[in-house]
Structures are given as C-alpha cells and as structure tokens.
C-alpha cells in the first residue's frame, strides 16, 4: 500500500504541476489576448482616420474636377470670343485680333496682377509690378 500511495502522490504532484503550468499558459494567453484587443482598437482608430482622410481627398478631387471643367468651359468661351474677334466685320478689330503679341509683352503681362482684386475695385486695367513688388505702371483694357 505504501508503494501505491507514493506512486499516487507522485502522480498527483505531477498533475498539480501540470495544472500550474496550464494556469500560467492561460494567464499568458489572456494577457496576449488583451494586448491584441488593444492593437485591434488602435488599428481600427487608424483605419477610421484613413477612411475620413480618403473622404476628404475625394471631396477635394471632386472640387478639382468641377473647377477644371469650369476652367475648360471658360477657356473655350474665351477662345470662341477671340475667334469671333479675328473674324470681325470691323477691320481694325480684325487686324488687332490677328496681330501677334511680342514675346516681351507676353512676359511683361505674365507679371501683371488683375486690378479688380485691389480695394479700389477697378477692373479696367492690370498693374505691372517691378522687382520690388510695387506696381509701376498699369495696362489698360481697350473696349471696342
């Protein structure tokens, strides 16, 4: 009987040790599970931010496309107006519209700012800016 009691005691101790190991593994897996849950929450928050950013970018892209279409329409209308001037019955207008603008004048006008954007609200001329950024002359629009 003593032999079997000692044998049972060893078996019981072995099983208790195994139970302790399993409890430690359970605790480790619970800690890992909690860490993974926090990671998932963090990833979901990042995902929500990215989805929000994508929606903002889609809205910007939509506004860009609408503005591009508007500018294309305005360019087409301006080109049509120029073509009408080039085919005008008024010879002076026709001659003016068909005259090439010198490259120097185009470069100069490239630095012009629309006067209508200034506080005086005038829109019949554009300023030509000097190297200091100050306007030093104005180019007036001629109306026919």
Image (spheres, rainbow, N blue to C red):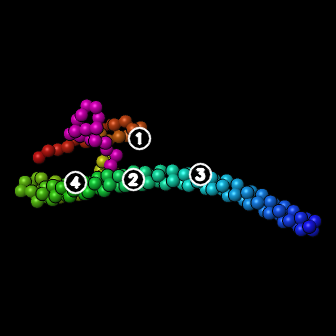
Callout 2: 10 Å neighbours few (<14), some, many (20+)?
Answer: few
Q: Which image quadrant for residue 4?
A: bottom right
Q: Which of the two labelled residues, at mark 3 and mark 1, occupies the earlier sequence position?
A: 3
**Disc 3 and disc 4: Cα gap in Å?**
54 Å
Callout 3: 10 Å neighbours few (<14), some, many (20+)?
Answer: few
| Position in image of residue 111 (x %, y %) | 34, 46
Say whether residue 44 is magenta. Answer: no
- Mark 2 vs mark 4: in front: 2
Label 4 belongs to which residue?
74
Question: Front-most of 11 and 73?
Answer: 11
Can residue 27 be seen here? The reply is yes
Label 1 belongs to which residue?
131
Q: Which of the two labelled residues, at mark 1 and mark 4, occupies the earlier sequence position?
A: 4
Q: Which of the two labelled residues, at mark 3 and mark 4, occupies the earlier sequence position?
A: 3
Question: Front-most of 40 and 127?
Answer: 40
Please give the label number shown on residue 24.
Answer: none
Callout 4: 10 Å neighbours few (<14), some, many (20+)?
Answer: few
Q: Which of the two labelled residues, at mark 2 and mark 3, occupies the earlier sequence position?
A: 3
Label 3 belongs to which residue?
38
SS at badge 2: helix
SS at badge 3: helix
**Disc 1 and disc 4: Cα gap in Å?**
31 Å
Outermost residue, front side: 1
| Position in image of residue 121 (x %, y %) | 24, 34
Q: Which of the two labelled residues, at mark 2 and mark 1, occupies the earlier sequence position?
A: 2
């Amino acid at each position: 009987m003593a032999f079997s009691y000692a044998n049972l005691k060893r078996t019981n101790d072995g099983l208790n040790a195994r139970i302790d190991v399993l409890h430690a593994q359970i605790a480790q897996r619970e800690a890992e599970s909690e860490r993974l849950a926090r990671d998932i929450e963090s990833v979901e928050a990042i995902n929500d931010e990215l989805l929000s950013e994508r929606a903002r970018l889609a809205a910007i892209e939509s506004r860009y496309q609408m503005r591009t279409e508007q500018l294309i329409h305005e360019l087409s209308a301006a080109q049509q107006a120029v073509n009408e001037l080039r085919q005008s019955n008024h010879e002076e207008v026709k001659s003016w519209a068909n005259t090439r603008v010198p490259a120097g004048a185009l470069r100069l006008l490239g630095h012009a700012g629309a006067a209508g954007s200034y506080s005086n609200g005038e829109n019949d001329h554009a300023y030509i800016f000097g190297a200091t950024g100050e306007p030093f002359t104005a180019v007036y629009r001629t109306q026919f």
